[in-house]
Image (cartoon, rainbow, N blue to C red):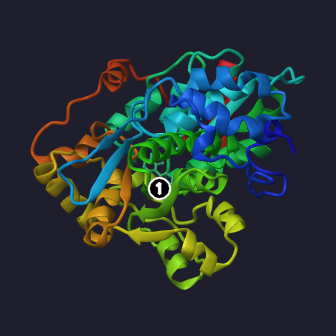
């Protein structure tokens, strides 16, 4: 299976997830230049080597990774710590990297099929916004975003619905699970299939995972050049796509040491690492809502790399952080470090302070997955002041909302999709 085909398909025909057949080897000495695009080219060219997309890799990277991923040292923290800020993209969350790379790739994969490409996304918040932003205004592709009406924050709802043009937003009178069921049903529906070539853009797509390795490569190379040490990472995790990219970058040979997962109160992953038992379950709602996952699909990829539980335990460790600990961390780090975290990032900050720092050796990087202004309803009451809104978010909030409210049912979705095609 070639890379382009895997990107178009998303999921393998047997329902499994695509993984690279093998990992190329790249060490610090292989990277002469420090920009995201230059590092991305060196890192990803082996994955693209025999693919029709190969000649476009630089253009894809230049178009998609056109905002920075800065590494900021936190001098006031105990030990040696930096923050990798992944929230400088158009929707202020790390998913912008993957969504934009996927969009730039899909745009360049020719298809003999005359039906328009339609990306269906069910979202509980961040994914849909990043995907809508990434595809908005691109030719030959439309996006339909389905979100549970009333179950995402006001600002998130706005990011999902402020697009128009080739992006359609459906506010579904149901839950996130209902939205996912509707998307699955649409893929099986002949009437929709007759008019649309359907594809998905969720986090299991290789086109979203591969580019996420690039910021881990850049950060670890920076630490390596500065400190001559491997960087250890703490990654806020839900469906495990972000942390998997870190683990893959380490497998390729980048100077990455320990990888620590910070999860919210959903216990599936920490329980598995502790006991070796895999017990997926329904997710429970937490303050770090974009990590509310009870059956993380990328675990399959992690286990394919580390099939033995003992081996997996050498590769990663995992800690679960409660809502109360998230709140305490947001309050305390704002006061003591002058840093305001989003609730997801706060899980990593909690793990650093309470698990890592007490016996810290080496240099640590905590990953900031979203800007706190996206979660102002949680953050502002805790810190007692407003979080300034970054300009790109302010621009989106100033756009009008265009959405269609639908019941859980295929008929209304079918009808809505016809209006764009
Ligand atoms: C999606 C998301 C996460 C979880 O990332 P995974 O790749 O699913 O583990 C963490 N934080 C934020 C802000 C997110 O949007």
Q: Is residue 385 left or right of residue 45?
A: left
Residue 43 spot, x, y in % from top left? 65, 39
Residue drawn at x 53%, y 31% as measured from the top left: 36
Residue 255 spot, x, y in % from top left? 53, 52
The foreground one among 223 and 3 is: 223
Which quadrant: the N terminus?
top right
* Residue 125 appears in the figure: no
The foreground one among 247 and 156 is: 247
Q: Is residue 34 left or right of residue 350?
A: right
Residue drawn at x 49%, y 60% as measured from the top left: 257
Residue 248 spot, x, y in % from top left? 63, 54
* Residue 221 appears in the figure: yes
Which quadrant: the C terminus?
top right
The foreground one among 284 and 384 is: 384
Q: Quadrant of residue 210?
A: top right
SS at badge 1: loop
- Seen in the picture, residue 33 relative to 295 is either above or below; the reply is above
Residue 339 spot, x, y in % from top left? 20, 45
Residue drawn at x 81%, y 35% as measured from the top left: 49
- Seen in the picture, residue 156 relative to 308 is either above or below; the reply is above
Q: In this figure, what is the number of numbered marks?
A: 1
The foreground one among 147 and 307 is: 307
Q: Which residue is mark 1?
A: 230
Callout 1: 10 Å neighbours few (<14), some, many (20+)?
many
Residue drawn at x 68%, y 44% as measured from the top left: 205
Q: Is residue 333 left or right of residue 143?
A: left
Q: Quadrant of residue 390?
A: top left
Residue extending farthest to the right is 112
């Amino acid at each position: 299976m070639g890379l382009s085909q895997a990107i178009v398909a998303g999921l393998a025909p047997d329902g499994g997830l695509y993984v690279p057949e093998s990992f190329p080897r790249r060490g610090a000495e292989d990277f002469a230049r420090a920009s995201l695009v230059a590092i991305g080219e060196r890192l990803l060219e082996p994955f693209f080597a025999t693919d029709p997309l190969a000649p476009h890799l630089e253009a894809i990277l230049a178009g998609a990774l056109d905002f920075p991923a800065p590494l900021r040292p936190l001098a006031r923290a105990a030990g040696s710590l930096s923050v990798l800020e992944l929230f400088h993209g158009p929707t202020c969350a790390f998913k912008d990297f993957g969504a934009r790379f996927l969009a730039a790739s899909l745009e360049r994969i020719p298809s003999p099929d005359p039906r328009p490409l339609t990306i269906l996304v069910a979202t509980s918040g961040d994914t849909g916004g990043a995907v809508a932003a990434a595809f908005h205004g691109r030719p030959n592709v439309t996006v339909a975003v389905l979100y549970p009406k009333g179950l995402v924050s006001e600002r998130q709802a706005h990011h999902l619905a402020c697009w128009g043009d080739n992006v359609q937003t459906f506010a579904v009178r149901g839950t996130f699970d209902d939205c996912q069921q509707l998307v699955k049903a649409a893929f099986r529906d002949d009437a929709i299939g007759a008019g649309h070539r359907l594809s998905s853009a969720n986090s299991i797509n290789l086109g979203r995972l591969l580019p996420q390795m690039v910021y881990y490569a850049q950060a670890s190379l920076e630490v390596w050049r500065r400190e001559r040490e491997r960087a250890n990472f703490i990654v806020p995790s839900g469906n495990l796509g972000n942390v998997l990219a870190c683990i893959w970058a380490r497998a390729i040979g980048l100077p990455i040491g320990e990888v620590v997962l910070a999860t919210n109160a959903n216990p599936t992953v920490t329980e598995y690492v502790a006991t070796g038992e895999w017990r997926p379950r329904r997710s429970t709602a937490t303050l770090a809502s974009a990590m509310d996952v009870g059956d993380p699909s990328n675990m399959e990829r992690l286990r394919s790399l580390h099939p033995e539980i003992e081996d997996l335990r050498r590769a990663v460790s995992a800690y679960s952080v409660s809502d109360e600990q998230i709140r305490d961390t947001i309050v305390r780090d704002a006061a003591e470090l002058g840093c305001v975290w989003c609730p997801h990032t706060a899980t990593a900050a909690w793990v650093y302070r309470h698990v890592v720092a007490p016996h810290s050796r080496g240099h640590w990087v905590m990953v900031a997955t979203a800007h706190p202004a996206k979660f102002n309803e949680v953050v502002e009451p805790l810190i007692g002041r407003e979080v300034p809104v970054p300009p790109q978010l302010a621009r989106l909030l100033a756009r009008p909302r265009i959405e269609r409210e639908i019941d859980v049912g295929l008929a209304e979705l079918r009808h809505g999709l016809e209006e764009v095609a």
